[in-house]
């Protein structure tokens, strides 16, 4: 049995809420989908008639928004109205790692989620299905449920966990053909109805066998586990990259060889300057915190090592640039190709580039950055957020340019931090003529054609080769 859903509200118009709701609206034209956010600028950008101004860059997103916006997809700052009208409410607000108090640096900060729950409790005028979409520590649904069931409204709030597995840069494809959709809820009669109701929304386009139902805790913990396993694969191959650099082994050859073992599989074995993004570090730290809070110290330490190795990889890359620059980068210009945490996104959260730059700034380097999608203010905000250098110092040492060729003039080194496809096709001969000699390239993504660059005269330093 399921309920009829005519109106959905999503609280939070970010990287998860925006694309997910756009696709739900696309595939369920009979449902009105309202995305609400307290950030006025963000909502204004989502409503901009110029689709290039959407607040997030995702291949294929603007087409979906163009098709649905104003038809059955709406963006608004009126959170209360959105909640009031909805049969089903998705909570997709940010859950950053806590920067204060208990669990600082590890636990997820749930204040935004709690605020949403309280707001729903005070505004709702009928029963609602509430879906947690943000990545959350296990047992958050319980907290949500506590707040909602203790409200004086007397209405029934059914809580579901529906973690999002989309990856940025491929969000629309991931949403259109997901490996699976996971829906966790209570095994009571009303819980089952809620699960079936949400399942039916996805089954408008996802094959039924890919929509999994579990209990709430399994669903919540599956999301953390998936991200921890993925992050662990990258740290594992990156650990091998350090060993490869000491031996004559080549990490890409190793990845290929082990990837053909069907028990291991070929994906997610690309050695790099380190993983970034809003999820991996946050979720692994969260897992560490949860394990510790249950007294499972060995489990916590095991996963913590995934983060330590990633930090090591970022630092190792910066150290290599310094070492090959005759042990000093002071006053030297280092050109960065890429700032986003991966290609095809303008998102920079936890990007390896930030940490590499910060380390080079400790050594008084000058950094000139080109990224096809990241804005100047974003770069400054990322570096200032670390709080290691003053804003004045950062702005005097770091420049952002909107053309790659403007980044490389008189550069002592070029560092590739993001695997943007366009980097491969540049006129490298022209770049060679502009940089200082010896011409050093540090390819943090192993994407450039080393042999060709060597022929042009470049020294190319790779990860794990
Ligand atoms: C991740 C998960 O993939 C997704 O399922 C979850 O919903 C959110 O977190 P995302 O962070 O958007 O998605 O991107 P992802 O493709 O997983 O990449 C994360 C980081 O790992 C990037 O910095 C990427 O460059 C790096 N990476 C990925 C590698 O260094 N090597 C790889 O082989 C794969
Ligand atoms: C292993 C490798 O699989 C093989 O490729 C290599 O050549 C030799 O080492 P083996 O040790 O014979 O082979 O057996 P394997 O099936 O890998 O199992 C090793 C251990 O892991 C066993 O104790 C098995 O019970 C355990 N295991 C395996 C699990 O606990 N869980 C699993 O999911 C798989
Ligand atoms: P994610 O990657 O998880 O989508 P984002 O930070 O991109 O994270 O998006 C989360 C959005 O949630 C932000 O735009 C933020 O303004 C919004 N938000 C946070 N708290 C609230 C709230 N109480 N009501 C409405 N929107 C909120």
Image: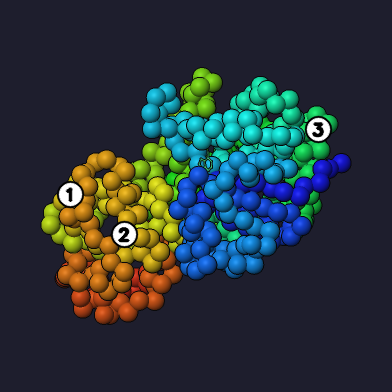
Q: Residues within 10 Å of mark 3 (few under 14, many from 20)?
A: some
Q: Is residue 358 above or below residue 409?
A: above
The span from disc 2 to disc 1 (Cα, nearest Å) is 15 Å
Q: Which circle's residue, 2 or 3, is located before the other in the chain? A: 3
For label 1, the crowd category at 10 Å Cα-Cα, with few meaning under 14, some 14 to 19 and many 20 or more, is few
* Residue under the image location 68 percent in, 34 percent down: 124
Residue 414 lies in what quarter of the image? bottom left
How far across and down, in percent of the image, does residue 287 sit?
51, 33
On the picture, is 112 further left or further right than 176? Answer: left
Cα separation, mark 2 vs mark 3, equals 50 Å
The numbered disc on residue 190 is: 3
Residue 366 placement (x, y as % from top left): 18, 57
Q: Residue at x 62, y 56 (%)?
A: 74
Quadrant that contains the N terminus? top right
Residue at the spot x=69%, y=48% of the render?
8
Say which label, 2 or 1, has the lower sequence index. 2
User: Which label is found at residue 393?
Assistant: 1
Which of disc 3 and disc 1 is earlier in sequence? 3
Q: In this view of the protein, which residue sits in the foreground, 462 or 227? A: 227
Q: Classify mark 2: residues with Cα within 10 Å, few (<14), some (14-19) or many (20+).
A: some
Compared with residue 331, is residue 390 higher up or lower down, i.e. above or below?
above
Q: Secondary structure at mark 1?
A: helix
- The Cα atoms of the two marked residues, 1 and 3, are separated by 58 Å
Residue 460 seen in render: no
Q: Secondary structure at mark 2?
A: helix
Please provide percent x and percent y for residue 233: 50, 47
As displayed, is residue 274 above or below residue 158?
below
- Viewer-closest of 382 and 285: 382
**Residue at mark 2:** 376
Residue 246: assigned label: none
Q: Are marks 2 and 1 in contact (CB under 8 Å)?
A: no
Q: How many marks?
A: 3
């Amino acid at each position: 049995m399921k309920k009829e859903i005519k109106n959905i509200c999503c609280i939070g118009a970010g990287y998860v809420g925006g694309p997910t709701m756009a696709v739900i609206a696309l595939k369920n034209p009979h449902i009105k989908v309202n995305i609400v956010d307290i950030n006025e600028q963000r909502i204004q950008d989502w409503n901009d008639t110029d689709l290039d101004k959407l607040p997030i860059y995702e291949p294929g997103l603007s087409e979906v928004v163009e098709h649905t916006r104003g038809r059955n997809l709406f963006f608004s700052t009126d959170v209360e109205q959105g909640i009031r009208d909805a049969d089903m409410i998705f909570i997709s607000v940010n859950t950053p790692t806590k920067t204060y108090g208990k669990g600082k640096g590890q636990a997820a900060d749930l204040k935004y989620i709690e605020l949403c729950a309280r707001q729903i409790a005070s505004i709702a005028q009928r029963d609602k299905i509430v879906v947690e979409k943000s990545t959350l520590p296990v047992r958050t649904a319980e907290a949500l449920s506590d707040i909602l069931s203790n409200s004086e409204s007397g209405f029934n709030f059914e809580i579901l966990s529906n973690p999002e597995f989309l990856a940025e840069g491929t969000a629309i494809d991931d949403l259109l053909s997901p490996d699976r959709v996971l829906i966790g809820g209570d095994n009571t009669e009303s819980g089952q109805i809620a699960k079936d109701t949400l399942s039916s929304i996805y089954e408008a386009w996802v094959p039924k066998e890919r929509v999994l139902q579990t209990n709430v805790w399994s669903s919540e913990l599956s999301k953390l586990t998936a991200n921890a396993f993925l992050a662990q694969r990258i740290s594992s191959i990156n650990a091998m990259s350090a060993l490869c650099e000491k031996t004559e082994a080549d990490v890409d050859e190793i990845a290929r060889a082990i990837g053909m073992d069907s028990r291991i599989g070929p994906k997610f074995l690309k050695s790099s300057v380190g993983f970034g993004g809003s999820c991996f570090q946050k979720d692994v730290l969260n897992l560490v915190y949860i394990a510790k809070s249950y007294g499972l110290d060995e489990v916590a330490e095991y996963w913590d090592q995934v983060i330590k190795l990633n930090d090591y990889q970022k630092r190792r890359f910066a150290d290599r640039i310094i070492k090959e620059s005759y042990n000093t980068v002071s006053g030297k210009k280092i050109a960065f190709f890429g700032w986003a945490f991966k290609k095809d996104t303008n998102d920079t959260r936890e990007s390896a580039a930030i940490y590499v730059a910060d380390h080079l700034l400790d050594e008084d380097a000058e950094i000139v950055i080109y990224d096809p999608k990241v804005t100047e203010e974003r770069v400054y905000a990322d570096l200032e957020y670390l709080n290691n250098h003053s804003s004045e110092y950062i702005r005097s040492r770091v420049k952002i340019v909107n053309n790659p060729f403007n980044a490389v003039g008189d550069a002592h080194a070029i560092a590739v931090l993001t695997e943007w496809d366009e980097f491969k096709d540049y006129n490298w001969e022209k770049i060679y003529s502009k940089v200082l000699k010896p011409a050093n390239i540090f390819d943090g993504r192993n994407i450039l054609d080393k042999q060709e660059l060597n022929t042009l005269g470049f020294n190319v330093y790779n990860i794990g080769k």
